[in-house]
Image (cartoon, rainbow, N blue to C red):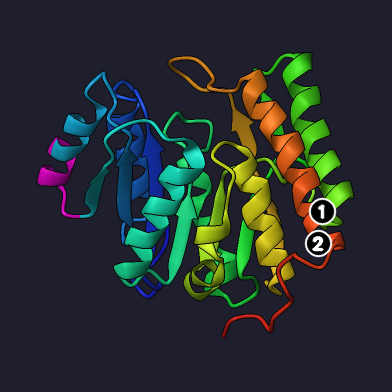
Amino acid sequence: MVSDSRPGIWVVMPTYNEAENLPGIAAAVLEAVPVATLLVVDDGSPDGTGQLADGLAAADGRIRVRHRKAKQGLGRAYLDGFQVALAGGAEVVVQMDADWSHDPASLPGLVAPITDDAADLVIGSRYVAGGGVVDWGPARRVISRGGSLFARTVLRLAPHDLTGGFKAWRGPTLGSIPFEGIHAGGYVFQIETTYLASRLGARISEVPITFHDRRVGHSKMSRRIIGEALIVVLQLRWDELRGRGPLRQPRQA
């Protein structure tokens, strides 16, 4: 559990048709990090997730809701939520899913390297010692590991888990990312933001997590999302080789 001396922590949680998951995951997040602000970013869920979030926010002042008119991709929902959190004075911004694949009990360990001034970006990693996945078939394991290895090799990045979405950011580091230049709308958003942070000189660390397949509903992974990831990774490296990539800068204080 995070003590009251911790800095302002915002947890950004995009939702689309997560009505069955939201009440439980919201309660678990705020139990793990009582001083946090939970920002639900709902993309006009037809199952009423947005209205449910409004009810939770009315009952608990630590919960806020950002309504978007339609589904526009995970990356776009995160960027919208990040801007709200940063405008609200967030010193630490956590991104996580609403489907229980990211365990709220891992939140204190994810945030600690930032509050201890040991990192600027912390990745909840499935692919370092102590991490892992459960309830996945062989094909999805290969796609996930292969995607991280591909991006790590092409973009010359150190982290082992580049496709995961359980991360904690130092506020000024996140604020230094050029949001307007991010062109990834799906899960490749995770790769792209880590790449940009690395090139801007951020200290990046990984902490082990166990990733669980979603409890309710179906995965939103698709062939289109996988194809987008391959294209964007290659484009990032091509742009960099041609001198159009982001320049290295000193890390944010």
In the picture of the structure, the residue carrying the numbered disc 1 is 237
> Distance between the Cα atoms at labels 2 and 1?
5 Å
Point 33% across, 34% down: residue: 43
Observer-nearest of 173 and 117: 173
Observer-nearest of 57 and 186: 186
Name the side, left or right, on which 69 lies relative to 199.
left
Q: Position of residue 250 (x, y in %)?
A: 68, 84
Within 10 Å of the Cα at label 2, are there few (<14), some (14-19), or many (20+) other Cα atoms?
A: some
Q: Amino acid at mark 2?
A: Glu
Quarter of the figure with residue 164: top right
Mark number for residue 240? 2
Q: Amino acid at mark 1?
A: Arg
Please state the extent of the stretch shown in magenta in the rendering: 55-61
Which quadrant is the N terminus positioned in? bottom left
Observer-nearest of 243 and 168: 243
Label 1: element kind:
helix
Is the C-beta separation of discs 2 and 1 under 8 Å?
A: yes
Within 10 Å of the Cα at label 1, are there few (<14), some (14-19), or many (20+) other Cα atoms?
A: some
